[in-house]
Amino acid sequence: MNEFRTLSFLSRFKWLFVKAGIDYSAMETILRMKLTMDGRRTPTIFTGQKKKEGNQFLKSLWIYGLYGLMIIPFMLFGDGHYIFQMSIVFGIIMFILATTMVSDFSTVLLDIRDKTVLQTKPASSRTVNTAKLIHILIYMFFITGSFIAIPLVIGLFNNGIVFTFVFLAALILTMFFVVVFTSLMYFAVLRFFDGERLKDMINYVQIILSIGVIIGYQIVIRAFNFADLELAYTFNWWHVFLPPMWFGAAFELLLNQDFATPSILLSALALVIPIISIYIYVKLMPSFERNMDKLMSESKSRKRSGRLMDFWAKVCCRNREERMFFRFASLMMKQERNFKLRVYPALGFAFIFPFIFIFTELQMRTLEDISTGSMFLLIYFGNMMIPTIIHTLQFSDSYKGSWLFMASPIQQPESAYSGTLKAFLVKLYVPVFLLLSIAFIAIFSTRILPDLFAVLLGAILHTLITYKWMDAGEFPFTQSFEFAQSEGSAKMFLISLGAGIFVIAHLIANAVVGGIYVYIVLLLIAIFIGWRRVFPMQSGEVR
Amino acid sequence: MSMENKVLSLRNVTMRYGVKTVLNGVNLEVERGQIIGYIGPNGAGKSTTVKIMLGLIKNYKGQVEIFGQDIASGDPSYKKRIGYVPEQAELYDNLTAMEYLAFTGELYGLNRKFAEEKAQKLMEEFDLGHVLHSRISSFSKGMKQKVLIISSLLHNPDLLFFDEPLSGLDANSMMVIREMLAQLAAQGKTIFYSSHIMDIVEKISNRIVLLVNGVVVADGSFEELQEKSEEGSLSGIFNQLTGFTDHASRAARFISIVEGGTDNE
């Protein structure tokens, strides 16, 4: 086991813990074990990368440092309107802290192994719970520290020493507030729902984090435009429910000497709510522990009809085995959390990127101007996600269940991937594509309908080509996610760029009058022949 | 009709992982209606044998015939008449029990409606009707085991491979399974039963095959084995045939380590 500098730092406060009736050496042992385990975990923001040696957490901190840069503009261009600039700053800080807390520290907070491993040992539950809280707080300090270090230095030079002190105090309160508030939220969910639902919610927060960071980045780049706007603050009753406003108001109160009632009220909340929530947290901890048992018990039943799935399976698939895998893959894509975590952000980008480019364009041209051009080809950005997702289809958390495919009498193993790819197209690609198409038709009018159809066909062909090049195993969902990063990333990137070839082909087709229809026919033929080549199956009912 | 009666036969089956020989010429003939207790110490090659017969492992040497068909021929149809419960309860557990069972039923060639109805009835018999539409990941070990047992029986197979099928089950469910196995065998199904729990193997099986270091070292009914080895119980026979006699001295050493030494802190 390693020695942690954090722990030797913590030991200076030993007397404080001993005074509170905590078995310090037991707590230290627990923390050392936890920190060692954490060093072997990969944080969510890093899921897209290869596994490396060493403490992944500490190595991921620079990313937070980078995110920290995006709050600098808000600190610089505010002309002392703290209520605006600091509310935004604390809004961003809270978003990052809360989402990180949920996505990366849920496992810590909800570790049910703690119960069997730690609570059976002679350590008081107060010691165990304190260890848990300290464990999370250590990380929050690291994250907040690296997130805020540069902005803090800039704040010191730009806004003075008093500002820095208020900032630090507010940060500590924010941190406690976020940690405790997240825990209380879990508590509420577990109180009323079951563990599976909670895991789903955590999964969605992880997905939102991945998408939010990218979109947030795009927004902040454009935020320079409104950062120097002059606005006068008027208080509304609902501001009470916006925690970032509390802290913004505290700056207003302390630095601008604004002693108006709203400022005092909001600032008081900034101080009081975190303290109250810690108190509630301590009080509720025992019943939280009890509710954690739900994580281990079976979840409530929910039956789905799946009639729509039956319909698509009938329409798209050529034989019984293919239909079977179509259904199986649809269910896996819908219910496997790790799959969703890896794929949904890509879907989100596919949906958002075309619009980001259009918005960028809008700063130079009018919408009418854009709507007559070929900008709709931006929809091909949506097709760039195809290789990533098809690559991910090889993996599953429960890959060990794949003995089933080998043990069962599957007549035509080709039907497995054929059905799976079709399920991907119908269940994941087409919904995103349809939404994009509706938005694009609204912008570019119905004249682009044939083009959109060509894009859809291009996507199908792209799917097929990706599968062919990827050289996957015989069956989908049969490998551990451990290997998801190891190979083929560079290959996948190349195939993603394949979308560009389709764009070029499309442009060529559009250069000729009616060329798009020729292009559509060519694509149809290519898909028809290609699919049969790649998946040579007998159609109809196979015995 | 001895041909029809022979369910499976292994002839000189050898399996190697690199330099390590796991199976070293296994010969075995099994007839209809037998319950075979397939036992052996850890690493003797029990699971490997089963996996070969299921087609999970392909690069073995020797001949394996199931229902008179050489399984190396590449036609997977013979698997339609086989049910399998693997040693570890590993399945696609993000699916619900119903989804998983319907899918396996379909894989074995059943119509989905039929598979679903059957799965529902079987789940209810195991008192699992209320979790039919819950994710398997939230199930306990015993519940997962029951789902696996159901999935192995949905298509009414003639040959069953059960690898430690009772692990995680409570005493009542164990009784149900034991009784079930006896009745299945009475109806002419063949059951290949691997386990480490000797008492159960002793009671369940009408033939016991002991594998040590990749070779069959004993094959016969419990009574036959008893006569040969002059041991009273199957675990006694097991110890004797695997050459393990120092359990008492090992235990004594273990205890002396537990009790000995002082904590110098």
Image (tube, rainbow, N blue to C red):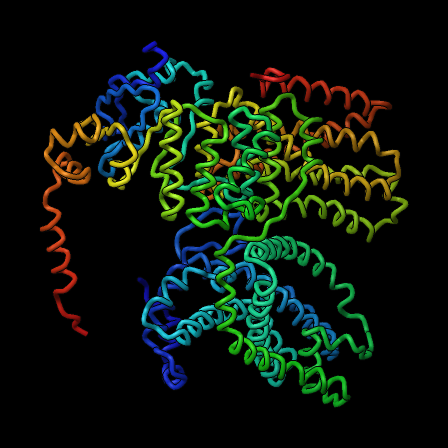
Res A380 quadrant in image:
top right
Q: Residue furthest right?
A: A368
Residue A68 can be seen in this image: no
Given residues A153 and A475, the one toward you in this image is A475
Q: Quadrant of the C terminus of chain A?
A: top right
Tell me if residue B62 comes above or below residue A4 in the rendering: above
Q: Residue A308: x and y, percent?
A: 71, 36
Q: How many marks?
A: 0
Q: Tell me what residue is drawn at x 12 percent, y 50 percent.
A: B250
Q: Is residue A37 above or below residue A446?
A: below
Q: Is residue B248 left or right of residue A180?
A: left
Rendered residue at 88%/49% (across/down): A366
Query: Who is closer to the viewer here, A245 or A54?
Result: A245
Residue A496 to residue B29: above or below: below
The image shows residue A362 at horizontal and vertical percentages of: 82, 51
Q: Position of residue A486 (x, y in %)?
A: 46, 41
Q: Is residue B219 left or right of residue B184?
A: left
**Residue B155 x %, y %:** 50, 27
Residue A371 appears in the picture as rendered: yes
* Quadrant in the picture for residue B187: top left
- Tell which of A526 and B155 is nearer to you: B155
**Is A107 placed above or below B114 here?**
below
Could you tell me which residue is drawn at 23 percent across and 30 percent down?
B20
The quarter holding residue A259 reads: bottom right
Residue at 67% across, 27% down: A461
The answer to whether B154 appears left or right of A459 in the picture is left
Q: Please identify the quadrant where the N terminus of chain A is shown.
A: bottom left
